[in-house]
Image (tube, rainbow, N blue to C red):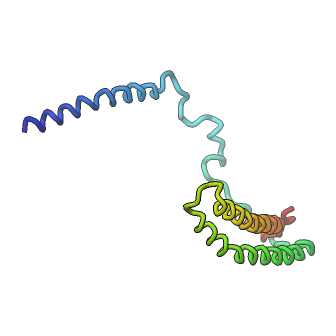
Amino acid sequence: MAGAMTLNRNRALLSIPIALPALLLLGGCAAQGTFPSLARRAQEDVPGRVSGTAQPAPPSAAAAPLPAPRPADTASVGELRSAASAAHARFTAQRDQVDALTRAARDAAPGSEAWATASVALAGLRTDHDALVGIQADLDGIDTRRPRPGDRMGRR
């Protein structure tokens, strides 16, 4: 019993050198000096601004019909869809081969023939993936230019 109490006391004494510097460092985080008041200032008491009494704008009497999509965008979507299908087909055709090569090179040393072959195959797979990402970015650009309900002039 006395041995257990001594062990607990020793543990407590060992933790003091660790805790003391931490407490001293935390004291440095305490702010010193005066700070500005958090009370509301005169600029914040402008009627209708902070009080939350603003009303939404009334809906327009007749919403203008949306303009038709630009012909260039319509043609671009078709071309981009074809390019995306081709890139996806290349990606899926290579995926199983690249998977087998990388599994075979898993324990190979860097710079070995198996490692180099797998790295080149993986780079080709990344190239097809990057092509798909570029096509997605182009489609996103077309989408941002598409008019939306409530737009007055459409997006440019």
Quadrant in the picture for residue 142: bottom right
Q: Quadrant of the N terminus?
A: top left
- Residue 139, quarter of picture: bottom right
In the rendered image, is residue 44 in sight? yes
Residue 98, quarter of the rendered image: bottom right
The front one of 128 and 116 is 116
The count of marks equals 0
Q: Position of residue 126 (x, y in %)?
A: 72, 64
Q: Nearer the viewer, residue 32 or 54?
A: 32
Q: Is residue 58 visible?
A: no
Farthest residue, direction front: 113
Please report the residue visible at 75 percent of the width from the left and 78 percent of the height from the top. Answer: 89
Q: Is residue 62 left or right of residue 98?
A: right
Q: Residue at x 60, y 48 (%)?
A: 51
Q: Nearer the viewer, residue 36 or 87?
A: 87
For image coordinates 63% across by 40% down, the residue present is 44
Query: Residue sitting at 72 percent across and 73 percent down?
Result: 91
Figure check: 12 above or below 147: above
Instruction: Say left or right for 112 vs 20.
Output: right
Seen in the picture, residue 87 relative to 13 is either above or below; the reply is below
x and y percentages locating residue 30 in the rendered image:
45, 27
Quadrant placement of the C terminus: bottom right
The outermost residue toward the top is: 33
Residue 62 screen position, x and y as percent: 82, 73
The reply, left or right, for residue 12 in relation to residue 24 is: left
Counting from the top left corner in percent of width and height, residue 148 is at 79, 70
